[in-house]
Image: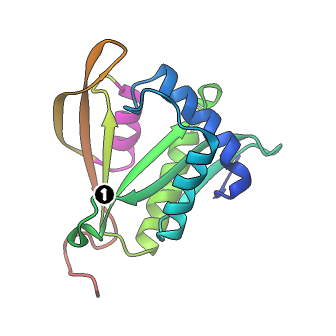
Amino acid sequence: MKIRPALPHHIDGIHAIYADAVRHGTASFELEPPNVAEMTRRYQALVEGGYPYFVAEEERGEVLGYAYAGAFRPRIAYRWTVENSVYVAPTAHKRGVGRALMEALLAECEVRGFRQMVAVIGDSANAGSIALHRACGFRPIGILPSTGLKFGRWIDTVLMQRELGAGDATVPDA
C-alpha cells in the first residue's frame, strides 16, 4: 500500500468508496451519492484551495481509501483550523489504511501551517472512526445529539479535535 497525493485519475475509485459509504453507512449525512462530476468538482476545490488530499493505493493502483482536509468554517478567523475526512473501502477495513491516511494528512496539515484539526464524525455508534481518531491523538469535545436523520433514525454527530504543530501555544504569522 502506498499513500500519495490524490490525482484526477483517482476520482473514480474515490467516488466508488464514497458512494458505498453514503448508501450503506452513517459517516456521511448525504442521502444520495454525488456523481463523478460532483466528486471531481469537490476534489478540485479542495486542492485549489491549498488543502491536502491523499489516496491509499494497492500496487495495482486500486484505491483503498482516501483522506482530505478542508476548511472547518468559511469565516477568516477559522483559517488555521481544518476539518478532516477519511473513507476506506469496505474490503480494506481493519488493514491500517485509515491510520496510514490519517498520519499522512496530519503531517501534511502541520507542514502547511494549520494549527487545529476537527473531526466531525457521523454517528456516535461509529466505533471504528472514533477509535481511529483517538489513536491519532484526537480528544472528544462533544456530541450533538440527533442532528442527522438517515435510514429512518436520528443520528448523533461526534466532535473530536487535535492540535497540529504548535497548536494554540503561539500565534501563526499571517
- Tell me the quarter of the picture where residue 164 sits: bottom left
Residue at 20%, 72% in the rendered image = 77
Question: Looking at the picture, does residue 11 appear above or below residue 145?
Answer: below
- Amino acid at circle 1: Phe
Can you give x and y, in whole percent of width and height, for residue 133 in the image? 37, 43
Q: Is residue 77 above or below residue 15?
A: below
Residue 58 relative to residue 172: left or right:
right
Task: Quadrant for residue 152, please give it.
Answer: top left
**Secondary-structure class at tag 1:** loop
Whole-percent x, y for residue 53 in the image: 55, 58
- Residue 144, position as x, y percentages in the image: 17, 34
Determine whether 54 is above or below 113 in the image.
Answer: above
Give the prevailing secondary structure in the magenta stretch: helix
Q: Position of residue 112 (x, y in %)?
A: 44, 74
The colour scheme applied to this rendered structure is: rainbow
Kindly give the residue lying farthest to the right in the view shown: 60
Answer whether residue 120 is magenta in the image: no
Residue at (29% x, 70% y) in the render:
80
The residue nearer to you, when weighing 159 against 51, is 51
Residue that label 1 marks: 72
Which residue is drawn at the image coordinates 75% and 43% (left, top)? 58
Q: Residues within 10 Å of mark 1 (few under 14, many from 20)?
A: some
Q: Is residue 127 one of those drawn in magenta?
A: yes
Residue furthest bottom as drawn = 173
Q: Is residue 163 above or below residue 24?
A: below
The residue sitting at the top extreme is 152
Q: Please provide the residue range marked out in magenta.
A: 126-138
Closer-to-camera residue (132/142): 142
* Quadrant placement of the C terminus: bottom left
Q: Quadrant of residue 73?
A: bottom left
